[in-house]
Image (cartoon, grey):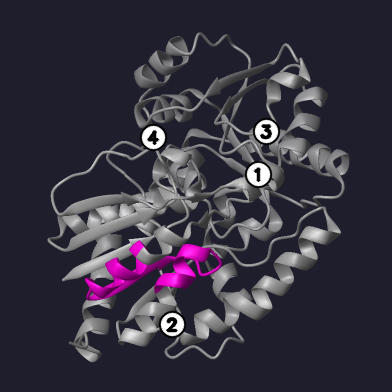
Amino acid sequence: MRVLTLSNYFECHGGGIEAVAGKLARGLARRGLSVHWMATDPDLPSSEARLTLETVAGWNGIERRTGLPLPVPTRAAAASIRARVEQADVLLLHETIYVANRIAAAHAQQRGIPALVVQHIGAMPFRSSLLRAVYAAADRLAVRPALARADAVVCISESTRRHYAAVPFRSPAALVFNGVDTAVFREPTEAEREAARAAWALDDRPTVAFLGRFVEKKGLQHVEVMARSAPDILWLFAGSGPLDPRAWSLPNVRVLGKLDRPDVVRLLHAADALVLPSVGEGWPLVVQEAMACGLPPVIGDVTAAADPAAAPFVVRAPVDPAAPTTTGRACLAALRTAWASETPEKRSGRAAYARTHYGDWDSVSARYETILNQLVSERPRRP
């Protein structure tokens, strides 16, 4: 089976959607499917057997101006997308709001080629009233109609599926949580934890890690309040973006830049908590990976609703994008309360929950393979 998959960027970009796109593309390829992955990104990740990658040339000014990763393909790139659709048996699209994905979906519909949409996010509560209005209009006029036209839809969280519950899907949207590389993201032994802290040259202070793009959506403005209010805590930031924590000039803040996977694992093994007071996300992959390492993740109430069963293992706080001071102090208070009741048993229980509830990427890829096979068998590709 020939699968054409599209995402906004490749995994080198560092966002959650593209990370999941990469995991699924590689997982399906390892299961024997022929996968062609297209994205607007000049930095091609490594390829492998049965997986080819192609850059979609485009303009990325929207992200540079607003932080929203919404690339716009060139006219030549749009023609290339249509050509690749012609060669596919089925499409796997990550989100429907991206221009390249919409071009692929429209052409596939014309040619009778089935499409599976993976919907990662639902609501997006920006601080800017203009951005809120633009996104709400796009959600109403573009995203929801596209989901209704899709042959199948997978939501990666309960909150995302709930947000689109009123969409008249062709078939009920499936709930499939993202997987976790449980072989590497796991609870460290005491020796591994000590080695990880030594590798990052950490002292005895409690350590909180932030992993993600340095943008408003990820809650950097709230974390700044936390860091200023808690000089006794060391704050480690992995990622990049326009809101650079170095500009805060705080002695308890250290920016590590973009990390490869081994260093991400070492960071989660060394830290005492993960903080991600983000908005407009389904169920961030880094939260699952932190839980698999035993770390308590500090997240917003809305994000926590993505997996209600995980409530005993996460640290919840109300997140208001328009009130960074209030939100930051609430998150810090929730973190200190959680640390006061943290035990080795709770840490191990958190890791066990992530391992058993989410599964590894091979089992998740198998679920997607079943859906894709069903779509192709129900609607064979037109000649």
Of the two numbered discs 2 and 1 in the rendering, the one whose residue sits closer to the viewer: 2
Give residue 90's position: percent from left, percent from top.
27, 75
Report the amino acid beneath label 4.
Glu
Q: How busy is the neighbourhood of tag 1: few (under 14 within 10 Å), some, or many (20 plus)?
A: many
Nearer the observer, disc 4 or disc 2? 2
316 relative position to 186: left or right: right
Res. 177 image quadrant? bottom left
Amino acid tagged 2? Ala
**Quadrant including the C terminus:** bottom left
Q: CA distance from mark 3 to mark 2?
A: 35 Å
The disc placed on residue 187 is 4
Q: Which residue is mark 2?
A: 150
Mark 1: secondary structure: helix
What crowding class fits label 4: few (fewer than 14 Cα within 10 Å), some (14-19), or many (20 or more)? many
* Secondary structure found at label 3: loop
Q: Nearer the viewer, residue 331 or 167?
A: 167
Tell me the number on the disc at residue 169: none
Sequence-first disc among 1 and 3: 1
Instruction: Give whichever of discs 1 and 4 has the lower sequence position.
Output: 4
Is 190 situated left or right of 255 in this image?
left
Dot 2: what SS?
Answer: loop
In this figure, which residue is indicated by the disc labeled 3? 242
Label 3 amino acid?
Pro
- Classify 232 as above or below 40: above
* Amino acid carrying mark 1 in the image: Lys
Q: Which residues are magenta?
A: 80-104
Residue 164 visible in the picture: no
Residue under the point 75% across and 59% down: 125
Q: Is residue 76 visible?
A: yes
Closer to viewer: mark 1 or mark 4? 1
**What is the distance, in whole Å, between disc 1 and disc 3 at their CAs?**
12 Å
- With respect to residue 125, does 117 lie above or below? below
